[in-house]
Amino acid sequence: VEWQPGERQAWRPADNTQAAFDLAYRQILSGDRGTAVTALAKEQPYIYTGMADGRIIVSADSGINWQPDHRIGQSGAVTAFWVNPGDPRIALAAFPSRLLHTIDGGLSWEDISVNLPDAKVRGVTADAAGNAVYIATDRGVFFARTNLNVLSVTPPSWTPLAGFLPVAATDLKLDSSA
């Protein structure tokens, strides 16, 4: 946290208009699908929805049409998505013990969780230009390099992010201004 001169609070009010809209949209989609939407990511025209029962459902036309459900065995609820803002066909989907990667807007998914740490994955983000993926887990933040523009033959190697304590992290976001 950076403190401005004369500032006495670390927390600042935030505009939660988008969060309120996302919550309402998740509730509508949950009713339509018969199970809770546990993760939602929008990068126009793509919408990625992750369900409590492990299904991933994607729309490539802003929600007008939806692809058939994609289910990944017994992976648990989808916990988070990251979608490439420069090419929304490229995305990552996090599950409690798995991480999936798509380059075709969710038509197919590659499992890149072979070397994941033994910890629940709660959040995911990436730096597409740097081919870097970051995950928030119950054991801290981990990092791996992988080419996000292609489906990889070699699974990435995950290492703890230096400078962070090995404590639970629930989400993460890269500073786009850095």
Image (cartoon, rainbow, N blue to C red):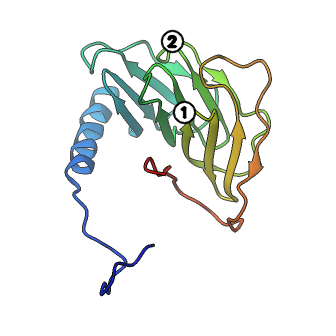
Pick the quarter of the image with the N terminus.
bottom left
Quarter of the image where one finds residue 109? top right
Q: How many marks?
A: 2
Q: Amino acid at mark 1?
A: Ala
Residue at the spot x=68%, y=25% of the render?
111
Q: CA distance from mark 2 to mark 1?
A: 13 Å
Residue at the spot x=58%, y=60% of the render?
169
Position of 119 with respect to 89 (left or right) is right
Spot occupied by residue 9 in the image (x, y as percentages of width and height): 33, 82
Helix, strand or loop at mark 2: loop
Spot occupied by residue 27 in the image (x, y as percentages of width and height): 27, 40
Q: Residue 93, labelled with which disc?
A: 1
Residue at the spot x=56%, y=38% of the render?
127
Spot occupied by residue 160 in the image (x, y as percentages of width and height): 74, 54
Q: Are marks 2 and 1 in contact (CB under 8 Å)?
A: no
Residue at the spot x=49%, y=36% of the render?
82
Quarter of the image where one finds residue 75? top right
Quarter of the image where one finds residue 74? top right
In the picture shown, does residue 56 fall above or below 61? below
Q: Amino acid at mark 2?
A: Leu
Label 2 CA crowd tier, 10 Å (few <14, some 14–19, many 20+): some
In the picture shown, does residue 66 fall above or below 172? above
**Residue with the mark numbered 2:** 107
Q: Earlier in the sequence, mark 2 or mark 1?
A: 1
Decide which of 51, 144 is in the foreground and name it. 144
Spot occupied by residue 128 in the image (x, y as percentages of width and height): 55, 32
Decide which of 31, 23 is in the foreground and name it. 23
Helix, strand or loop at mark 1: strand
